[in-house]
Amino acid sequence: DQQVKQNSPSLSVQEGRISILNCDYTNSMFDYFLWYKKYPAEGPTFLISISSIKDKNEDGRFTVFLNKSAKHLSLHIVPSQPGDSAVYFCAASDPQTGANNLFFGTGTRLTVIP
Amino acid sequence: DVKVTQSSRYLVKRTGEKVFLECVQDMDHENMFWYRQDPGLGLRLIYFSYDVKMKEKGDIPEGYSVSREKKERFSLILESASTNQTSMYLCASSLYPGHDYGYTFGSGTRLTVV
């Protein structure tokens, strides 16, 4: 059963506009959330994270919002740039599951149109 | 910077061959993982290891085995390669405890089985 869901497999946005990528989860024990970015033929790289005790974390053009009551998080990219075109994976951590504690969504492919 | 190195970026193997994918990390991480990534299916965990000589099955272990003889090295073995194992294979490592830091991924191995 998929505990982390990214319901939009793809998203297209004009350069300069805002990109909003969404992620839903079911496990209330998740206490840390991460976003990874993946270019073709490369491994995912860490982008930004947020602890469950916060509702917002910002890093330059990237902001992650967490709504615990709705079990929903989102990644905002403003302004979007063509180099942001990639697959974005949402991940959530359950500290009680031991070594294998990170659960991934299925990814959203973002295309930023110049 | 943590480095996770996968020995091959691209591999082409014949059906029935035994295939070895190698992964080495240089930051003394306890945990190592093998995923495969397929379009629309996200990252699927094949096997992981939380210590030398220890291994645990992930979500899709069938047709695969692993070996961890040294802490820094985690090998994925396809006992008899089949065309449905054509995929992008990603190795990752993590520090435990310390789930806050997420996983660090290698650059991936694109395996084609013909």
Image (cartoon, rainbow, N blue to C red):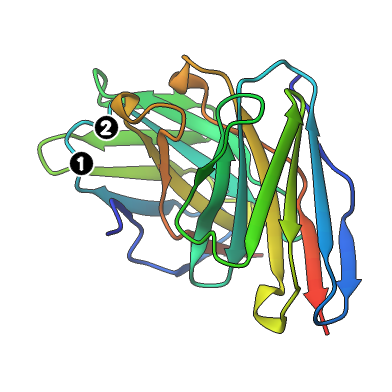
Q: In which quarter of the image is residue B20?
A: bottom right
**Residue depicted at 81% across the width and 52% down the height:** B21
Picture disc at residue A30: 2
Disc 1: which chain? A
Asked if residue B73 is positioned above or below residue A112 in the image, the reply reads: above
Can see residue A83?
A: no
Q: Nearer the viewer, residue A24 or B113?
A: B113
Quadrant showing the C terminus of chain B: bottom right
Can see residue A54?
A: yes
Q: Nearer the viewer, residue B52 or A83?
A: B52
Q: How crowded is mark 1: few (under 14 residues within 10 Å), some or many (20 or more)?
A: some
Kind of residue indicated by mark 1: Asn
Q: Where is residue B101 in the image (x, y as percent from the top left)?
A: 52, 21
**Residue depicted at 74% across the width and 22% down the height:** B2
Reading the image, the residue beneath label 1 is A27
Picture disc at residue A18: none
Instruction: Say what secondary structure mark 2 lies in.
Output: loop
**Residue depicted at 72% across the width and 61% down the height:** A40
